[in-house]
Image (cartoon, rainbow, N blue to C red):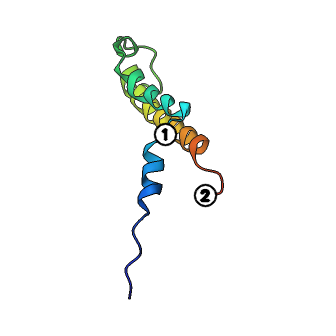
């Protein structure tokens, strides 16, 4: 049985050179959780949880949403 052929080098290079402006959106889920003003209070509470805890979940959802949006906007047409 033959091993699958490795990916062509020019295909890998084209992915590395993707200069889409959509990629800048990936900075949002990195920078936003680093702003201490978001965590500097106990209220509002959500279902009894202080702001810090429910914001952690919000940052995860923000990261997943942003990553999904960038992926969909930057994938090449014709790929499945």
Q: Residue 58 appears at what percent x and percent y?
A: 46, 30
Judging from the image, what secondary structure is the residue with disc 1 in? helix
Q: Nearer the viewer, residue 72 or 11?
A: 11
Mark-to-mark CA distance, 2 and 1: 21 Å
Q: Is residue 63 above or below residue 37?
A: below
Q: Which mark is residue 40?
A: none
Residue 50 seen anywhere in this rendered image of the structure: no
The furthest residue to the right: 78
Give the side of residue 31 with respect to residue 70, left or right.
left
User: Going 34% across and 20% down the picture, which residue do you hit?
Assistant: 34
Q: Which residue is mark 1?
A: 64
Is residue 42 among what the camera can see?
Answer: yes
Q: In screen coordinates, is 68 left or right of 43?
A: right
In the rendered image, which quarter contains the N terminus? bottom left
The residue that label 2 is drawn on is 79
Marks 2,1: beta carbons within 8 A = no
The residue at the point 49 percent across, 41 percent down is 18
N-terminal label among 2 and 1: 1
Q: In the figure, residue 72 lies in which quadrant? A: top right
Return the residue found at the far front. Answer: 10
Other-residue count near label 2 (Cα within 10 Å), few / some / many at <14 / 14–19 / ≥20:
few
On the image, the x and y values in percent for residue 12 come to: 43, 54
């Amino acid at each position: 049985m033959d091993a699958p052929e490795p990916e062509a080098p020019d295909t890998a290079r084209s992915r590395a050179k993707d200069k889409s402006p959509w990629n800048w959106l990936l900075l949002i889920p990195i920078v936003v959780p680093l702003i201490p003003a978001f965590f500097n209070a106990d209220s509002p509470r959500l279902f009894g949880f202080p702001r810090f805890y429910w914001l952690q979940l919000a940052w995860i959802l923000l990261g997943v949403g942003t990553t999904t949006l960038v992926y969909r906007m930057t994938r090449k047409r014709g790929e499945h």
